[in-house]
Image: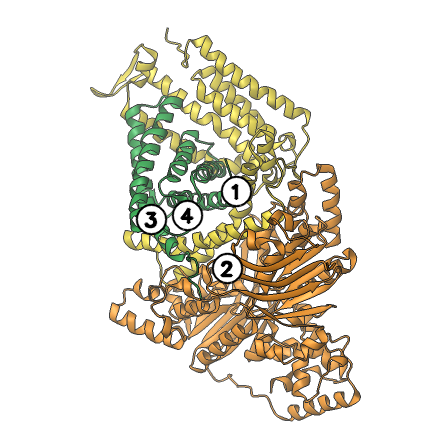
């Protein structure tokens, strides 16, 4: 597998942004719920730099966040974040995204893809691991996962899509500047 | 076959995204051990030429090449291949500094070659010593100043011992004093290592402070001059392409002294002035002194903005604090154009943050038009005082120009009709009416800067604070922006420039507030600040070359020469 | 604990290599995940708390986070009880009632024991993660990961992330201040839609300037030969001291013991009720 220097740097910067958003930015949305902006950025980076990059950003970003908060590392959710990053990398063709050749249909694809990705991660992976590791009651972890997943999905769909759409506008095409 | 170290033969290059070639028919030879300055305005192709040397072109930025480039007699085959011969110090040291400590960053290239740790430690130590960076070898990059970061970046390239060193705009983000040290350091490195040194820079006076063998002048993708520094500084080409001539050369020209390359004007230290030359300068100065400089007396007026004994400190940890502004008081009057000057870290940016309300002062008051601002929110203050950040890319957040400028009004709930009227009128003022419906991505850096000025002006503030408005701009763009700010000032906006650009102060600001280590150490006419060697030293500023010229011409009061230059 | 502000304390734990501390943290995580044996979980916590004491981390430093963890665990316990009051009975197969609250909710010994184990499991990773975080120089992270077998490119990505966190943080602050000056409000006072829009005005410049940055940094790294060779040495690498080997042995023992409890208990749960 080819892991280019650019992808190494994208992993690092993506993780740094994930960390800063998760650790320092808390924008209230309603009572005790905060915008999880980091998942919108994770979805965007995974779309542009591919699944492996996405996986690592989720893994590194979330682990560093947990470490810095000091509450231990909650592997079940760390792994779920990594799965979000990994799967988001398949939603749109990263080659297309990188060149900024995304069309409306790709954005729609991104929204529905994100629904699937967050559904799998927070509806299956995170609760599944919580059951396997902590023998937590199934009904509790599924509800917990769905609440978190719904929030993460909505912010990704709204903010991540807006980022991708704007990104497509900023890229310049061959021979277009004169 | 030639045996030049670097040779461009009929070389042209066109970026994939561009319609026209960026480099056109370049023919250039650089011999081993030469020290070359490549100068030219933005967009002249000088950076592209540098990218061809270090292999970023064509390997990472694809495009069409015609002709040939040989380095060490061979055409490079990859970035890795080029980097064995050419070490590049980038303009943006934050992008180059990848290590978590200075020492780890210097070691980066050695780590990549899998050099054993013990060798590495020795080589890193020696190289840090060479650039005098050992003191902060174990510090993290965010604890270093810009100049220190640059030294580490240089060490990180030197440690690799490549035969060619390429410096891409090394002075762009440094204050003048640090820039002077950087020029001296590059010279020392060149002499000691016997490397071939290539410096890409448009601030030619600062580079020519030390010896340079040849200057290559570029414009529109072509080489338009390839000559000695002595020839270039007296050439009309500099004015034509929009590169600033050294200040002392301009002063001599204004005094009517005709300079020839044989007078060695490339550097003040080598410059030979005849007694008649000196006399004509003295005469010019004496004439100017008899005309009084216009100063305005504000004593009776109410100040527009007043700072009263303001102090501010940052928490470093929970226990220790760092005082960044110490008991600062001054008044700004309506219609002034004031420069806030001082070295990096002198407290200039903090001052702006306090005025705009990003930070609250520990003690003291900030009074706007007789009203204490401490009760005002950031958005409320923005309607009184506009703030323009140094980097427009950090401010612009909409893809289209109109929406970008309209943002401040829309979030305040203005009706779409009024939004349109106000945006149109502010874009008119900023000379952007023609591009009102364009996407931001189609704009040049200078145009983006204007968009961010429009962002602030659309709220109709009375004061505009600009952080380093001309940083990284070549002379032509610099003049554009400054003339624009002058016209704004003339229309009644009070302008505050935070800067370390001495030229800007001298030529545009009427008043200077000089900061050093958080203290306001002088409040005077800009020319006085820059011709007072003691003040300059205290504020880590660099006195301008006019001051040295005055000494050279036996003029007792150097300030009079600066004044002559200004009138 | 605001960010990655490592302060060396010169204790034995500081002198251990990051590699062995990561190894121990991982081994303890995995072993505490595998088993539900109360005795083993208590042992893991005891070992990590003793490291904590050896590292001379003051209680004051971690008071806030301990309160947070306590509150979290409390809420989690209440939630478990509300959702599945009979989970313990299900697991341990016996039922000793302590207090009947309603038809659905009865406190049983088994439930209490199960919830205690869950709490211990959650808590077991806390002290060791704190020890690792507070006593390891970030400059050592990459070497440590590489030494443990992680590819050097991924290891370096971690190091680079740590390098650029302060810069991203500063950018975020600068951008958000500039947007606030224009009137963008992302605080509780603004309606949700305005807040979302406001967030975008910060994220756009933050993300897009980062993309340019990625380009510049990767070019600079390539020019300095990153990725050219199959392997890489590390300036910040360390040689192992005897404590590193002791820690490694403890880590392996942890895993071994954890697996052994499964054999011993005939499954993941230690059942004191039969």
Q: Report the number of discs.
A: 4
Gap in angstroms between the C-alphas marked 4 and 2:
39 Å
Q: Position of residue B406 (x, y in %)?
A: 33, 66
What's the chain of the residue with tag 1?
A
Residues tagged 4 and 3 counted as in contact (Cβ below 8 A): no
Q: Residue at x 62, y 45 (%)?
A: C225
Gap in angstroms between the C-alphas marked 3 and 2:
30 Å
Indicate which label's residue lies in the foreground, 4 or 2.
2
Q: Colour of chain B?
A: orange
A83 sits left or right of C245 in the view: left
Q: Colour of chain C?
A: yellow
Q: Quadrant of the N terminus of chain B?
A: bottom right
Indicate which label's residue lies in the foreground, 3 or 2.
2
Question: Does label 3 or label 1 sit earlier along the sequence?
Answer: 1
Task: From this view, report whether residue B466 is shown above or below residue C138.
Answer: below
Mark 1: secondary structure: loop
A146 sits left or right of B536 in the view: left
Q: Residue at x 37, y 60 (%)?
A: B399
Residue position marked by numbered label 2 in the rendering: B15
């Amino acid at each position: 597998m080819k892991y280019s220097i650019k992808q190494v740097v994208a992993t690092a910067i993506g993780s740094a942004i994930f960390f800063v958003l998760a650790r320092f930015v808390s924008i209230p949305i309603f009572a005790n719920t905060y915008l999880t902006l980091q998942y919108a950025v994770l979805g965007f980076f995974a779309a542009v730099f591919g699944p492996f990059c996405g996986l690592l950003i989720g893994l590194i970003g979330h682990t560093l966040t947990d470490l810095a908060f000091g509450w231990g590392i909650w592997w079940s959710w760390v792994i779920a974040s990594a799965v979000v990053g990994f799967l988001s990398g398949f939603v749109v063709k990263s080659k297309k995204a990188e060149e900024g050749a995304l069309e409306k249909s790709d954005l729609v694809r991104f929204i529905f893809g994100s629904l699937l990705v967050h559904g799998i991660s927070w509806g299956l992976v995170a609760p599944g691991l919580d059951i396997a590791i902590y023998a937590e009651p199934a009904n509790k972890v599924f509800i917990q996962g769905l609440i978190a997943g719904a929030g993460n999905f909505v912010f990704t769909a709204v903010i991540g899509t807006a980022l991708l759409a704007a990104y497509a506008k900023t890229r310049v095409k061959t021979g277009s500047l004169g | 076959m030639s045996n030049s170290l670097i040779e461009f033969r009929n070389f042209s290059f066109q970026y994939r995204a561009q319609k026209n070639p960026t480099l056109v028919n370049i023919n250039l030879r650089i011999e081993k051990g030469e020290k070359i300055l490549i100068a030219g305005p933005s967009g002249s192709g000088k950076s592209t030429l540098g990218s061809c040397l270090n292999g970023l072109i064509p390997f990472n930025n694809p495009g069409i090449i015609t002709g040939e480039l040989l380095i060490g007699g061979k055409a490079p085959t990859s970035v890795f291949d080029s980097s064995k011969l050419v070490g590049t110090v980038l303009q943006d040291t934050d992008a180059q500094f990848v290590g978590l400590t200075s020492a780890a960053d210097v070691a980066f290239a050695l780590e990549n070659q899998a050099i054993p740790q013990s060798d590495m430690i020795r080589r890193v130590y020696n190289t840090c010593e060479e650039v005098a960076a050992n003191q902060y070898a174990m510090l993290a990059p965010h604890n270093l100043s810009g100049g220190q970061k640059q030294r580490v970046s240089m060490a990180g390239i030197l440690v690799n011992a490549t035969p060619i060193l390429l410096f891409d705009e090394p002075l762009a983000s440094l204050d003048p004093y640090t820039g002077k040290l950087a020029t001296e350091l590059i010279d020392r490195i060149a002499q000691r290592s016997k490397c071939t040194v290539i410096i890409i820079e448009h601030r030619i006076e600062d580079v020519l402070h030390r010896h340079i063998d040849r200057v290559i002048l570029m414009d529109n993708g072509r080489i338009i001059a390839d000559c000695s520094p002595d020839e270039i500084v007296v050439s009309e080409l500099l004015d034509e392409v929009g590169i600033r001539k050294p200040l002392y050369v301009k002063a001599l020209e204004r005094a009517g002294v005709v300079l020839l390359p044989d007078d060695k004007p490339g550097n003040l230290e080598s410059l030979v002035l005849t007694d008649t030359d000196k006399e004509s300068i003295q005469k010019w100065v004496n004439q100017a002194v008899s005309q009084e400089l216009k100063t305005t007396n504000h004593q009776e007026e109410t100040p527009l903005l007043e700072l009263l004994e303001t102090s501010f400190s940052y928490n470093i940890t929970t226990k220790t604090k760092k005082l960044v502004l110490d008991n600062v008081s001054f008044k700004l009057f309506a219609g002034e154009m004031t420069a806030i000057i001082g070295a990096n870290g002198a407290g200039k940016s903090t001052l702006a943050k306090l005025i705009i309300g990003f930070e609250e002062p520990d003690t003291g008051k900030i009074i706007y038009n007789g009203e204490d601002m401490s009760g005002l929110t950031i958005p409320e203050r923005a309607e009184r005082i506009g703030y323009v950040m140094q980097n427009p890319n950090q401010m612009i957040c909409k893809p289209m120009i109109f929406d970008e400028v309209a943002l401040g009004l829309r979030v305040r709930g203005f009706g779409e009709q009024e939004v349109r009227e106000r945006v149109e009128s502010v874009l008119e003022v900023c000379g952007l009416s023609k591009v009102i419906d364009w996407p931001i991505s189609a704009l040049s850096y200078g145009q983006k800067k204007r968009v961010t000025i429009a962002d602030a002006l659309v709220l109709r503030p009375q004061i505009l604070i600009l952080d380093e408005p001309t940083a990284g701009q070549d002379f032509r763009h610099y003049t554009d922006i400054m003339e624009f700010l002058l016209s704004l000032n003339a229309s009644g906006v009070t302008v505050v420039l935070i800067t370390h650009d001495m030229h800007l102060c001298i030529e545009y600001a009427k008043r200077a507030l000089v900061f050093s280590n958080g203290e306001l150490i002088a409040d005077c006419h800009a020319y006085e600040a820059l011709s007072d060697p003691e003040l300059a030293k205290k504020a880590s500023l660099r006195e301008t070359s006019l001051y040295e010229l005055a000494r050279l011409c036996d003029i007792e009061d150097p300030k009079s020469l600066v004044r002559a230059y200004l009138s | 604990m605001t960010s990655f502000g490592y302060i060396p304390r010169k204790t034995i734990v500081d002198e251990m290599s990051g590699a062995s501390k990561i190894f121990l943290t991982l081994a303890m995580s995995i072993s505490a995940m595998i088993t539900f044996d109360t005795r083993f979980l208590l042992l893991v916590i005891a070992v990590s708390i003793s490291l904590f004491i050896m590292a001379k981390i003051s209680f004051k430093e971690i008071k806030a986070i301990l309160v947070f963890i306590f509150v979290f665990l409390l809420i989690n316990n209440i939630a478990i009880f509300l959702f599945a009051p009979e989970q313990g009975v299900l697991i341990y197969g016996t039922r000793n009632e302590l207090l009947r609250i309603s038809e659905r909710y009865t406190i049983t010994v088994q439930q209490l024991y199960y919830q205690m184990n869950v709490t211990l499991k959650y808590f077991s990773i806390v002290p060791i993660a704190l020890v690792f975080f507070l006593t390891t120089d970030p400059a050592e992270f990459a070497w440590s990961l590489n030494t443990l077998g992680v590819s050097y490119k991924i290891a370096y990505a971690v190091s680079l992330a740590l390098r650029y966190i302060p810069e991203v943080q500063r950018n975020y602050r600068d951008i958000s201040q500039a947007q606030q000056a224009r009137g963008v409000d992302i605080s509780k006072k603004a309606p949700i839609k305005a807040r979302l829009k406001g967030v975008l005005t910060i994220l756009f410049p933050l993300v897009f300037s980062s993309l340019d940055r990625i380009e510049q940094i990767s070019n600079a790294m390539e020019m300095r030969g990153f990725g050219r060779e199959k392997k890489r040495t590390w300036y910040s690498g360390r040689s192992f001291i005897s404590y590193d080997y002791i820690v490694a042995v403890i880590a392996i023992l942890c895993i071994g013991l954890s697996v052994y409890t499964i054999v011993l208990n005939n499954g993941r749960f230690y059942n004191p009720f039969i």
